[in-house]
Amino acid sequence: MTETLQARLAEALAPIANPRTGASLYQTQQVRDIAATREGKVRVTLLLEAQDDPTLARQVRQALERVEGVTEVRVDVKDAAQGGFSSAPSGRAGRALPIAEQPAAAPKAPAAPTPVAYPNLGRIIAVSSGKGGVGKSTVCTNLAIALAKAGYRVGIMDADIYGPNIPRMMGVDEAPPVKDEKIQPLEAHGVKVISLGFLIERDQPAIWRGPIVMKIITQFLRDVAWGELDLLLVDMPPGTGDAQLSLVQATSVAGAVIVTTPQEVAVGDALRGAMMFRRVGVPVLGIVENMSYFESPETGKPMAIFGSGGGERLAKELQVPLLGQIPLYPPVLEGADSGAPIVASQPQSHAAQKLTAVSGAITQQLGLRPGAR
Ligand SMILES: Nc1ncnc2c1ncn2[C@@H]1O[C@H](COP(=O)(O)OP(=O)(O)O)[C@@H](O)[C@H]1O
Ligand SMILES: [Mg+2]
């Protein structure tokens, strides 16, 4: 799809408002998956809730048919509730946030071009991994704390729908307050935190799919009172799914940090994850190899137990720096479980020092000066 055709399609869709919410179908992503062939065949998905006006599908089709260069239009109507969108967040009233029902601000002009810039959020960094359990959230929380200690204003957005455990790791597992229609992030260890974990029950399976992920990511970027940040770290779900795409479609991502373990299987998955960011124009800042070796708290001696060299191979393959090798060190786990990540609880440990060094390498790559605001 040429950029100009895409722009014309967006322009045609933007003025169509959902009469139920008053918001633009395009801006709220109710119209999505906009694809067009070179020959002008256009296909879009329209998500409709049960209460929505079904004639919206016709409006969308007619608007697209009028666009110059369009030869054929197909509108796939999907049930928005199918992804658990309307029922999932309201499990318990006390925890539910006013996210799902809040209409987006009605656009005055044709839709702003996506992705939207959020200058107050500073550099947005995706922390990603090929598979779960490699220590992505551990790395994310510790990097954030190290950056805050270095004087940066830092936020964490926990977008891991499958394992939103940032709140527990940071020790702030409570519903964030809402003030003036903005969600107030919680704060711990000098870092502002918002999480999908605040929206869902711990034992409730996260069955939300594409539509809600995009919506929540956009609203976390836009409707959270972040204030002014230098860096926003986003803890992504493992893999190359909806959340990764949603984030890069929603805003401009300064870079991705890929976390892996030394094992071959973790490296293969991580490579695919890294390539996905590359394809959408997000630079991979580097690799963090976690659980690189076992460091005994008693003797301090290093022992390779998960194989070795994975991070280095991956870094070489991608021609990006290996930002650090973090030991498997039991207090890292204890710190995560007790809400005091190792950089906060044992800053002198090797693990904490290595994580801090990674944070320094990242700011250096981004051209940020230590403590500079
Ligand atoms: N370097 C480490 N040393 C010891 N335990 C670790 C280390 N990194 C992560 N862990 C533990 O491993 C588990 C998985 O880490 P986590 O950060 O939740 O992974 P992910 O976010 O990739 O799923 C957690 O219990 C965490 O405390
Ligand atoms: Mg995690």
Image: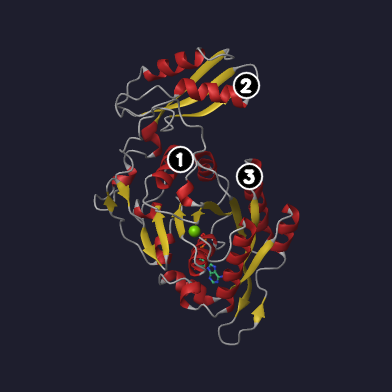
Q: Earlier in the sequence, mark 1 or mark 3?
A: 1
Does 209 sit left or right of 270 as displayed?
left
Q: Which residue is mark 3?
A: 276
Does 303 sit left or right of 139 as displayed?
right
Q: Secondary structure at mark 2?
A: loop
The residue type indicated by label 1 comes to Met
The quarter in which the N terminus is drawn is top right
Q: Earlier in the sequence, mark 3 or mark 2?
A: 2
Q: How is the image coloured?
A: secondary structure
Q: Nearer the viewer, residue 293 or 360?
A: 360
Count the marks: how many? 3
Q: Secondary structure at mark 1?
A: helix
Q: Secondary structure at mark 3?
A: helix
Distance from the alpha carbon under mark 1 to that under mark 3:
17 Å
Q: Earlier in the sequence, mark 2 or mark 1?
A: 2
Vertically, is 299 above or below 32?
Answer: below
* Residue 102 drawn at (x, y percent): 31, 38
Which residue is painted at 41% across and 16% down in the image?
A: 59
The residue type indicated by label 2 comes to Thr
Q: Which residue is mark 2?
A: 37
Which residue is painted at 43% across and 66% down in the image?
A: 169
